[in-house]
Image: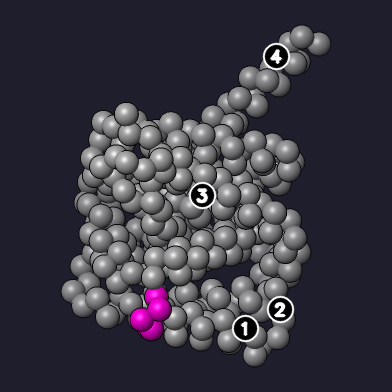
Amino acid sequence: MIFSISLSLTLFLITLAVSFLYTRYESKVQSLFGGRKFRLRDVVLLVVTMGIMVTILAFIPKLDIIRVFFLCAYSLILFLSTYLTVPKWYFAVLSPAVFVYLYSSPHWNIYLLNFFAILFAIFVSIYLGVLFTWKTTAVFAALLTIMDIIQVFGTKFMVVSSQKVLTLALPAMIIIPTFPSGFPVSWIILGLGDILLAGILVIQTTKKYGKKFGLMTSIAIAAVFLLLETILLNFFSGYFPATVMVICGWLTALGTRHLYKSRVLGAS
């Protein structure tokens, strides 16, 4: 039986870091956005834009254009993230410069790719976590999952764009060796969009129900992800929309809480 804990464990640790850092920098990020919140139409527009970007990436013939686009986007994220933690412009400029240098140099490897991918996923989750409410989070999760399913199984544009990004070794995904080793699948990949969704769900759950249940949500997402991943590794080959796995873990946590509260209220 094929079995690996590395990806689900990584996802758990990332969502844990997102939850911890969000509570620390929430006020700073809120001041950065002036207390703005996404409305429903903003969420719909965001998901549509993400879907369009995936489609465009699938059709762009020149990889250099994709490379420049991602490097610009990542540099902006690094600048804002550094300025958020250390409000000095010269430090903020230094971090994207180091990233571009490392990516362009022979020193770029899978470890640096994963490091920057995780860094981007954490900070983007924190930025977006401030903009979402509980209602818009639910709508965003549903629409993003539907878009992911269509782009993976229907149009297959997600597959094509992911392969291009992988060819360029851009930090738009994490690439983790399977553990325990010794079976045919040696590496497994998870896109930043899936990690971003998990981070936002944990942030919003923590805000609504407290830190303890936020932690339980991180555990539930990782556990359900591990279960579904094991099933896929043994009985399915090819790309699968990981947003489905993340959503299943989140709904499991919410469902378990609802059942527990119902029993407690029933017993009283």
- Reading the image, the residue beneath label 3 is 10
Front position among marks 3 and 1: 3
Residue type of the residue flagged with mark 4: Arg
The single residue placed furthest to the bottom in the displayed view is 90
What element does badge 1 sit on? helix
N-terminal of the pair, mark 1 or mark 4, is 1
The single residue placed furthest to the left in the displayed view is 61
The question of residue 5 being in magenta is answered with no
Residue type of the residue flagged with mark 2: Val
Disc number placed over residue 263 in the picture, else none: 4
Magenta highlight: main SS: loop
Q: Tell me where residue 242 sits by quadrant.
A: top left
Q: Is residue 167 left or right of residue 247?
A: left
What element does badge 3 sit on? helix
Disc number placed over residue 92 in the picture, else none: 1
N-terminal of the pair, mark 4 or mark 3, is 3
Q: What stretch is highlighted in magenta?
A: 104-108
Front position among marks 2 and 4: 2
Residue type of the residue flagged with mark 3: Thr
The single residue placed furthest to the right in the displayed view is 268
> Label 2 vs label 1: CA separation?
8 Å
Residue 164 in the image: above or below residue 41: below
> Label 2 vs label 3: CA separation?
27 Å
> Label 2 vs label 4: CA separation?
47 Å
Measured as percent of width and height from the top left, residue 198 is found at 53, 48
N-terminal of the pair, mark 2 or mark 3, is 3
> Label 1 vs label 4: CA separation?
51 Å
Residue at the spot x=38%, y=46% of the render? 178
Q: Can residue 215 be seen in this view?
A: yes
Residue at the spot x=25%, y=42% of the render? 184
> Label 3 vs label 1: CA separation?
27 Å
- Reading the image, the residue beneath label 2 is 86
